[in-house]
Every structure is written in C-alpha cells, then in structure tokens.
Image (tube, helix red, strand yellow):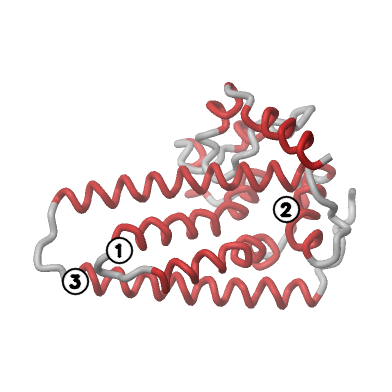
Amino acid sequence: MNEQKAYPAWQFTIEATALTIFFGYTALYSYSLVNSYNARAEISTALYLQLILYALFAYITADFVSGLVHFLADNFGNPETPVFGKLFIYSFREHHVDPKAITRHSFIETNGANCLVSLPGLIYFYYASGPVVDYTFRFYFLIFYLSIFMTNQIHKWSHMDFPPSFVVWLQRLHVILPPRHHGVHHTPPFDKYYCITSGWLNAPLSSLHFFQALKKVLTWNFH
C-alpha cells in the first residue's frame, strides 16, 4: 500500500471534536486535583508514594488496554464497516501493509480516535467522583486516559526514522515503546507483542500465550 487513503472531512471533524473535549476534561481533572491538593491540611509522604504507585499502575493498565485493542482490531471486525471500521479498524489493518503510513498521519489523525474512545469513561468518572474524597481515584484515571491518549503518538514515534531526541532517550530507557521491541510484532505471523504504550507487558503476555488463547476463545464463541 503505497498511497494513503484520503482523510475524510467527517472523520477529521469527529476526531478534532473528540480531541478538544478530551483536553477540556483533562484540564478539569487537573484543576480539581490541584485545588484539592492545595486545600489539604496535611500532606504526607504516604500520599506521594500512593500517587507514584497509582501513576505506575495506570501506565501499566494503559499498556494492557493498548494491547487488547490492538489485538481485537487486528483480528476481528471489518475495516469497511461504515464509520466504526474507518475510525477504529482501518488504521490497524493499513499498518501491517504499510508500517510507515502512521508516520505520515497528522496529529489529529494519529490521536483523535484514542480521544474519541476515551470520552465516555473520562466524562463518567469525572462526574461519578469527587476531587477530595476520591482524590487518588481521579488521579489514577487522569494518568490512565492521558497514557491512552499518548499511545498512538508513542506508536508513531517507534516507526519514525528520526524521532525527536527526547523521544529517542525515552525509547532507550524503555519508558515508552522502543522500535526494536515493537519490531517483534511486525515479524510474521504478527500475533504477539500487541502492547504499544510502553510494551512492558509484551514479554509476560507472550510467555503466557495470552492473546493466542484469547483468540481461540473468541473464535470459538463468535464463529
């Protein structure tokens, strides 16, 4: 696939709107958390440790979700399905034919779909929680959804020939998905190393044959 399909105006509109709303709600989360933090009479070391653990867990959870979504989009559904197929499946199928296509996508085309799929949970947890009582709960979901938002951008960087220097540094430290690590997924039969946020879970999930087993279960139930 040498030529990239046109990015339809309707898709741009949906994804640009989703991205705008996403940033609006992450700003609301951040503002409420900062206000709640400033209003606390006592700040303990235990709170800092708790927030670090929540952030780490949120990042790892996002890595797992990125792998699960990647697995489902690669193996199930149809990219020709109206709206849904174009928004969520086509780019994954295109990616195996032309791995460099993602590097030619604009910021909105790269990240809009992740914002769109995140909105229901992001909005629900904002109104279902309170900034004081559910401080760590809100903090977890803020980091989780920001990590989900960054996933496709991280994935794009892993395919770029010359990513920004700070990205190369993070890749070398394996804070984000390194190109060589992600290259395992692009090796036939393309059935492992689906996680594309940090890739930390790829090795353990592969050793457990997690996605191969899940595919058998889903194929048995739905075919």
Q: Which residue is mark 3?
A: 38
The amino acid type found where label 2 is placed reads Ile
Q: Are marks 1 and 3 in contact (CB under 8 Å)?
A: no
Q: Is residue 62 above or below residue 85?
A: above
Circle 1 — which element?
A: loop
Q: Amino acid at mark 3?
A: Asn
Residue 54 x, y percent position in the rendering: 34, 49
Q: Label 1 is placed on what type of residue?
A: Asp
Between marks 2 and 3 in the image, the one whose residue lies nearer the viewer: 3
Q: Residue furthest left?
A: 41
Q: Nearer the viewer, residue 161 or 2?
A: 2
- Residue position marked by numbered label 2 in the rendering: 102
Residue 134 — which label? 1
Element carrying mark 2:
helix
Pointer 1: residues within 10 angstroms few (<14), some, or many (20+)? few
Q: Residue at x 46, y 41 (%)?
A: 175
Query: How dense is the environment of label 3, judged by Cα within 10 Å: few (below 14), some, or many (20 and up)?
Result: few
Residue 95, labelled with which disc?
A: none
> For residue 195, which quarter of the picture?
top right
Q: Quadrant of residue 159?
A: top right
Q: Which residue lies at the image location 41% right of the left edge and 70% below the top edge?
A: 128
Tag 1 or tag 2, which sits nearer the N-term? 2
